[in-house]
């Protein structure tokens, strides 16, 4: 018991860091998604760049394009999700561009949604609620975890199986 108590502050720190996001993220299979991005701050011309999405939330999107957009760029974005009847449309701001050294290949970046267009926010919310997307690793809140999955449950919620084994052996 003393050992479990020694790790509790570390676990609380990790949990607090994971919960800094306003909305939980959900994974998207990149091969089944599409992203079209066009800069709206006047410096990107009228050409849309196409790529793939990796995860999405009601707050933003992580995706890749063949070329990086500068952090801070304002963009119009359209995301095609598997099972979603229409693309999600929004305006957004590039908040992160992953390092080319650490992440070679197509440029991964993240945007924060500023405004959803039309019914896109409601459509995304419904799509998530209907279970089309799975929670991203390490980001699901306890209420969104599958209760039967002991590997994703917080340590203090995991069942102690030693009692079960004693009852079988005894």
Image: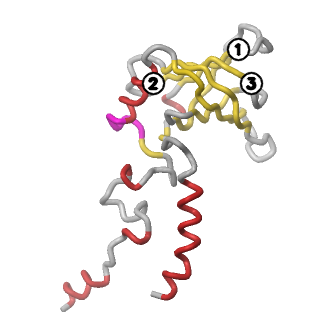
Q: Residue at x 41, y 38 (%)?
A: 133
Element marked by disc 1: loop
User: What's the mark number on residue 121?
Assistant: 2
Q: CA distance from mark 1 to mark 3?
A: 8 Å
Placement of 77 over or under 20, stated as above or below:
above
> Is 23 included in the stretch rendered in magenta?
no
Query: Do the CB atoms of the residues marked 1 and 3 lie less than 8 Å apart?
Result: no
Residue beneath label 1, please? 40
Q: Sequence-wise, which precedes: disc 1 or disc 2?
A: 1
Q: CA distance from mark 2 to mark 3?
A: 21 Å
Q: Quadrant of the N terminus?
A: bottom left
Residue 68 placement (x, y as % from top left): 76, 29
- The segment highlighted magenta reads 129-133
Residue 71 placement (x, y as % from top left): 76, 31
User: What's the mark number on residue 73?
Assistant: 3
Q: Is residue 120 left or right of residue 143?
A: right
Element marked by disc 2: helix
Placement of 163 over or under 37, stated as above or below:
below
Residue 55 placement (x, y as % from top left): 54, 38
Q: How many marks?
A: 3
Q: Residue at x 51, y 27 (%)?
A: 33
Element marked by disc 3: loop
Q: Is residue 28 left or right of residue 99?
A: left
* Neighbour tally class for label 3: few under 14, some 14-19, many 20 plus, Cα within 10 Å: some
């Amino acid at each position: 018991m003393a050992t479990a108590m020694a790790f509790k502050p570390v676990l609380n720190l990790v949990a607090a860091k994971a919960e800094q996001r306003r909305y939980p993220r959900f994974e998207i299979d990149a091969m089944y998604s599409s992203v079209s991005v066009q800069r709206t701050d006047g410096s990107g011309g009228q050409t849309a760049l196409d790529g793939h999405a990796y995860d999405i939330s009601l707050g933003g999107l992580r995706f890749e394009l063949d070329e990086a957009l500068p952090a801070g760029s304002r963009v119009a974005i359209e995301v095609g999700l598997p099972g979603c009847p229409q693309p999600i449309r929004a305006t957004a701001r590039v908040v992160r561009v992953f390092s080319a050294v650490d992440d070679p290949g197509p440029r991964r970046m993240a945007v924060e949604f500023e405004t959803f267009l039309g019914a896109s926010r409601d459509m995304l919310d419904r799509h998530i609620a209907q279970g089309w997307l799975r929670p991203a690793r390490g980001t699901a809140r306890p209420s969104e975890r599958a209760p039967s999955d002991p590997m994703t449950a917080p340590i203090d919620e995991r069942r102690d199986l030693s009692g079960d084994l004693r009852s079988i052996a005894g």
